[in-house]
Amino acid sequence: MTTTTHDAHTDTPAGRAPAPRPAAGRVSPTGEALRRALDGRYHDLKQRWRDTISAADVVRDPTWDLETAREWALAQMVSLVERGHLVAGFPAALGGIGNQADSVAQFEMLALGDLSLTIKSGVQHGLFGGAINNLGTQWHHETYLPGTMDCSITGCFAMTELGHGSDVQSLETTITYLPDTDEFEVDSPTPTARKAYIGNAAKDGKWAAVFGQLLVAGENQGVHVAMVRIREEDLTPAAGVTIGDQGHKGGLLGVDNGTLAFDHVRIPRRQLLNRYGGVNDEGVYESAIASKNARFFTMLGTLVRGRICVGGGAASAARKALSIATRYATKRTQFRAPGLGEEIRLLDYQTHQRKLLPNIAKAYAYGFAMNELMDQLQRVTDAAGSDPKASRELESRAAAMKAVLTRWANDTIQVCREACGGAGYMSENGLTMLRQDADVFATFEGDNTVLLQLVAKSLLQGYKQTWGDMDLRGTAQATARMVGETVLERTTARAVIDRLVASAARRPESAQLTSRGWHVQMFEDRERHTLEGLAKRMRAAGKASTEDSFTAINACQEHMLAAARAHTDRVVLEAFIAGIEAVGDPYVKSVLIQVCDLYALTVLEENKGWLLEHERIDSTRAKAISQQVLDLSARLSHQAIPLVEGLGANEEWLNSAILR
């Protein structure tokens, strides 16, 4: 990056009043440079969105009723596609523009506008289209993908059932091969087999990618996916398909969620998405992957992009909320300074700085971590299955980031709502709709608790494939062998981090609070100790009797969540370090170093109970960490506007009356 000339106000030292804000719609030079740094290699793509997409394209009126919101979401999705957006990740030969990583970057940008529109496209292009793209063959691609891209073939991702959500392997829907007619029969054999909460099902979907147990010659081959017509062109239900509308929800009103049930619906054999397994011309099931469990995880692994998108979309929603609340805090005044007569800005209060600045620091940290995750997705996609280890690492990282980012987003949007007082509760100011729409991100594309357990399981055993057919007791026994063998996987900043850790040991204790090497050591130590402690507990659980093994292992669940969070915190910190290392502008780099300090110390402060209990710090250092968080928040509050500009949302997209 070339060096940028910055406005004088961006260099304002602490204690001096900040200079005037840039005019509405304009971005300060520092804000632009921060935006470029945070976008990373996706900057050109994201900037095209900022330059060509207006608020009218992506901002929804919060007062619209259910039907109006649904009609708007469909119309805007079609409009964006017609202008060449939303088709990244599909084959270029069929009209796709951009790769898998680009499609996630698109999702992040769309989420800065409206989450209903984001999820509408996410269902159509990401989930339904992704299932066809990743699980289908060339015939499926040529038959369904062009219409999926231009929205003439509207579709659903019919996985979740009333009786089974996270436990996909236990789905009850059946897809039975009928050799006499060379067809499959799709059926919902029980009331709990009804597909539920399915986006695009209630109103717009004509097709569904239906997940069910594949039954061939009396043998269950595990979960597979079939393309099933659910509506005719006039949108009346197809024969044998019962469709329900789940109506008004707590958010995402523009997404028409519904239910689907199938009554012995017959489809041609070729409509099974059979890239990883299907019935051949002789009516015999065949797959290159012999193990049913391995086949199941391979199939689900190809759909990991959806989980990455949800994490990135939630983070975008939090960025938008922080942009609204921070901008408001620089304008809104409350009470007069003693002896001065001037009212005090909200952002000049320590408690307000404490609410917003640490979360802005997290927004940057998670942004850099998302960039790494998107790069990782593209590498795995390009490898086309030739690197199973990398695929498993990607699945674990995606699960971790989705769980952490969606939890943070929900918490942060609420903080921002409260930071705007009564104004934040007014629909016209944009925060209540964000809060409603982001709520469900914590549970769709994987419940966060389940995902963190998946991460811990992956950390303990190395890779999910090893756990394959193990029951709980076998899992615990295998875990025992991992004690002391865990090696922390470095991110792309390995050489830089090793140098920082080495230099930290040479610094005096008084300087360690802002020593990046010390931060890394604390994060690593917490991860390693928590993981080894979990492994020891699992070893003990593995010695329990068969009757007691579930109780013993169940008692480790909170420990599993703690290990997963500690791992994710360390990965995010290292991604932030790598992101800073790539910045060429010395001034912007210096700002980001302070932001990274605030992120690291905020996480350490949030976990100082653990650090104290395990004697990593004493009470004096614990107090010093908290004071440093306050000091950094105050210092960075003078950069508040450039910092939120750097988060990437066009001011007009914020759709907040209090900023106009």
Image (cartoon, rainbow, N blue to C red):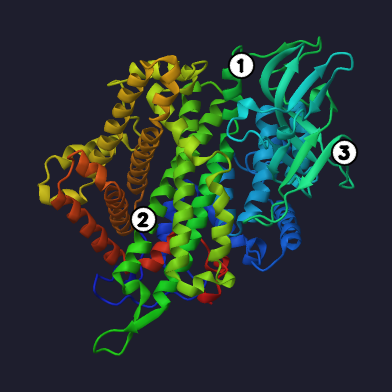
Label 3 Cα crowd, 10 Å radius (few <14 / some 14-19 / many 20+): some
Q: Which residue is drawn at 36% across and 71% down?
A: 7
Q: Residue furthest front?
A: 547
Q: What residue type is labelled 1?
A: Lys
Q: What residue type is labelled 3?
A: Ala
Residue 87 picture quarter: top right
Q: Which residue is drawn at 79% across and 27% down?
A: 186
**Residue 132 shows in this picture:** yes
Residue marked by disc 1: 292
Spatial CA span between label 3 and label 2: 51 Å
Position of 62 relative to 206 (above/below): below
Question: Is residue 305 toward the left or the right of residue 464 in the image?
Answer: right
Disc 1 to disc 3, how far (Cα)? 32 Å
In the picture, which quadrant includes the C terminus?
bottom right
Q: Which of marks 3 and 2 is nearer the N terminus?
A: 3
Does residue 144 sit above or below 598 in this rendering? Answer: above
Q: Which residue shows up at 32% across the image and 69% down it?
A: 638
Which residue was labeled with disc 3?
Answer: 238
Q: Residue at x 54, y 56 (%)?
A: 47
- Disc number for residue 361: 2
